[in-house]
Amino acid sequence: MRDLFFKLFALSHFDTGIKITPMSVSHIVYLVIIVGAIVGGYFLLRKCTMERKIMVMKILLILVAVSYISDFFVHEFVYASYSDETGELLSGGGLNMDKLPFHICTVLCPLALFAQFNKYGKKIIEPVVMLASLAPLMYIVVPASIGSGEPWCYQAVQTMFYHGVLLAWGILNLALGIVKPNIKKCYTSAIMLVGITLWAKLGNLLLEHNWFFLEEDAFYIGLVEDGILPKWSLMIINPIVFFSAVLALYGICYLIRFIASKPNGKSISEEKAIELEEAKAI
């Protein structure tokens, strides 16, 4: 049984040598599938009731949670070591430290679950949705740590599935009007980013890792190692970069809302009445 699992979760099944590298054919295929699924989901749900939309968002988060938690049970097989010469199994992979909830994408899983399913979580749902619409997108566009497996191996599929569904949850919450961003609350995203930075730094100090890329730059081009940037500066640069992206997303949301409100001719009072009804549904 153990040998079978090593084969099932191997990085290569056909020895094709194909990998997911930025802007490769396999990477573009994944991008098309993820973007197409999100766009398709929007058109399928846009005319549904608010209750139905929220139900789908809950299902998406359940999928994210199942994908994330179940992944820990197969790390032994996915990240096993093999001989370069003979291809024979040398040892099991054990726990992949990078998957612990200290990266922004991984910590968004418990944060999103809390925001979606706990009544007190509604207070943080806006910053969580904003970050869930950005962090997985950054990873999917530049999948730097997806591994060297074939595009259809478990490691690649699980990684892209997790980030893709998390991204869908964030974007669809915004696109379907479930969460309406309020620029006056942008400070909540800043506070959350500071919290995530400190949380990742704690993990790095205790477990000697590079979560949230606070020990070395995200592209591993040696900016800290070569002395170009002091390590402490990443604790400032990284959250500022993300917060800048959050502000840009606020701008996009407001622009789309402005353009969409022009043709329908609804008054401000009518829009507020609709928002109140939707808030009650949530």
Image (cartoon, rainbow, N blue to C red):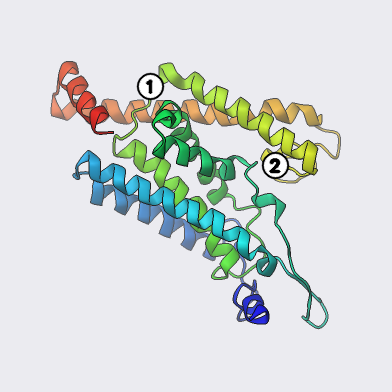
User: Is residue 133 something that shows in the picture?
Assistant: no
Quarter of the image that includes the C terminus: top left
Quarter of the image that includes the N terminus: bottom right
Q: Secondary structure at mark 2?
A: helix
Graded by Cα atoms within 10 Å as few (under 14), some (14 to 19) or many (20 or more), the crowding at tag 2 reads many
Q: Nearest the camera: 112 or 230?
A: 112
Graded by Cα atoms within 10 Å as few (under 14), some (14 to 19) or many (20 or more), the crowding at tag 1 reads few
Quarter-wise, where is residue 173 in the image? top left
- Residue at 37%, 26% in the rendered image: 181
Task: Determine whether, in the image, residue 69 is placed left or right of residue 144.
Answer: left
Q: Which mark is residue 182?
A: 1
Identity, as a three-letter code, of the amino acid under mark 2: Trp
Task: Determine whether, in the image, residue 138 is placed left or right of residue 119.
Answer: right
- Residue at 19%, 26% in the rendered image: 274
Quarter-wise, where is residue 269 in the image? top left
Give the mark nearest the N terminus, 2 or 1. 1
Residue 22, image x, y percentages: 59, 56
Residue annotated with mark 2: 211
In this view, 76 is above or below 164: below
Q: Nearest the camera: 166 or 18?
A: 166
Residue 28, image x, y percentages: 49, 59
The residue furthest front is 119
Identity, as a three-letter code, of the amino acid under mark 1: Asn
In this view, 119 is above or below 188: below
Quarter-wise, where is residue 9 in the image? bottom right
Q: Secondary structure at mark 1?
A: loop
* Cα distance in 3D space between marks 2 and 1: 30 Å
